[in-house]
Amino acid sequence: MSVLLTGGLGYIGSHTAVEMLEAGEEVVIIDNLSNSDKKVTNAIKEITGKDFKTYIGDVRDEKLLRKIFKKEGIDAVIHFAGLKAVGESVKKPVEYYDNNIGSTVALLKVMKEYGVKNFVFSSSATVYGKAKKMPIYEDFEIGGVTNPYGRTKYFIEEILKDLYVSDNSYNIALLRYFNPIGAHDSGLIGEDPNGIPNNLMPYITRVATGKLECLSIFGNDYKTKDGTGVRDYIHVVDLAKGHVKAVKKLRGNCGLKVYNLGTGIGYSVLDIVNAFNDVCGGKVKYKFAPRRAGDIDECYANADLAYKELGWKAERDLKDMCRTSYNFEQKHSK
Ligand code: NAD
Ligand code: UFG
């Protein structure tokens, strides 16, 4: 049986494809290349030495989905495909609802037609909004989201819960990612955003390689140890391995499960910059700038449930996250 990875040529999807193939799974990818490159297919093949099928197309295209389900013997789906830029989602809410929710609904309809009931969803720590205390557990209240992107994640979680109530023979894992950074050790795949990056690590790597001048640290007056924002950064390879475990769990008929995928450690922006400068020899210049609208002081997980139930925990440290991010930027980005 094969696992369908929607958005499998993107940042997290490509790393998951590698880990799935290396775990002996058959993989099929669908991606519309809206935020990725066809060349990633070859990179995944080069890393793993394994072959797999890639369909270039949109997950909202039900006709194409039917063709894939008919042909490929899919027994589980990992749904990465979606738009993910918070700021852009405020400007283009309809596109975000259409793409993120539309693709999920199309998938669920076609999965039903073909009797496929194992589903992993790429959710986000964003669904917790501004949590009242740290660390964040899976049973904390969700829904206090402040932008359309976050709302798509919350709404999709609710759709999947409704689906499970209607038919509890489904197996669904809602994986709430914290802040994925880092890249594959090979430097062949990684995060390569178009234009000026919104997220911290891609901005840092571009300052380190001279493509951007100076990092602006958004706020140094938060209620944190050094005043800068604190997040739970997780190596993308660790995150990818979590998906391999989640698919195994689904196949054991687990019902609906929610897991935080993070390290459980909160690092500040300054921690990240300092760790990165250790790796790259001090090339990251920074200045303090005003807070970014919508940012919260801190956000980090308790990830014990994933360890207890999936046997998964993050193993790579901050130095490894910085080293591999830098390696990828030096080798491969535009
Ligand atoms: P990404 O943009 O690198 O990957 C998403 C992939 O989906 C891209 O290759 C894109 O071309 C494809 N895609 C988008 N819409 C599509 C559609 N309608 N049909 C087919 N393909 C489509 O993003 P990523 O960082 O790999 O994120 C993967 C998932 O994880 C997303 O759902 C994202 O919201 C979620 N997530 C990401 C983060 C993060 O910080 N990276 C955090 C939490 C959750
Ligand atoms: N930051 C800077 N300068 C920058 C970019 C970011 O100081 O140029 C700071 C932010 O203020 C924040 C931290 O670095 O304190 C991390 O910011 P990111 O933009 O990298 O990540 P966020 O925590 O804001 O958001 C990310 C994803 C969201 C997701 C969320 C939770 O972008 O999509 O993690 O998973 F919802």
Image (cartoon, rainbow, N blue to C red):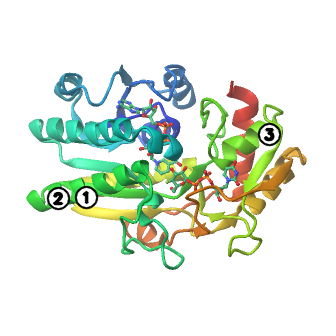
Q: Secondary structure at mark 1?
A: helix
Q: Label 2: which residue? A: 162
Residue type at numbered disc 2: Asp
Q: Secondary structure at mark 2?
A: helix
Q: Is residue 16 visible?
A: no
Disc on the earlier residue, 1 or 3: 1
Q: Does 27 sit left or right of 68 as displayed?
A: right
Q: Please say if 318 is above or below 42.
A: below
Q: CA distance from mark 1 to mark 3?
A: 39 Å
Q: Residue at coordinates 52% horizontally, 29% vertically from top-left?
A: 44
Residue density around tag 2, few if under 14, some if 14–19, many if 20 or more, within 10 Å: few
Quadrant in which the C terminus appears: top right
Residue density around tag 3, few if under 14, some if 14–19, many if 20 or more, within 10 Å: some
Q: Label 1: which residue? A: 158
Q: Is residue 290 visible?
A: yes
Which is more toward the observer, 323 or 49?
323
Q: Label 3: which residue? A: 207
Residue type at numbered disc 1: Glu
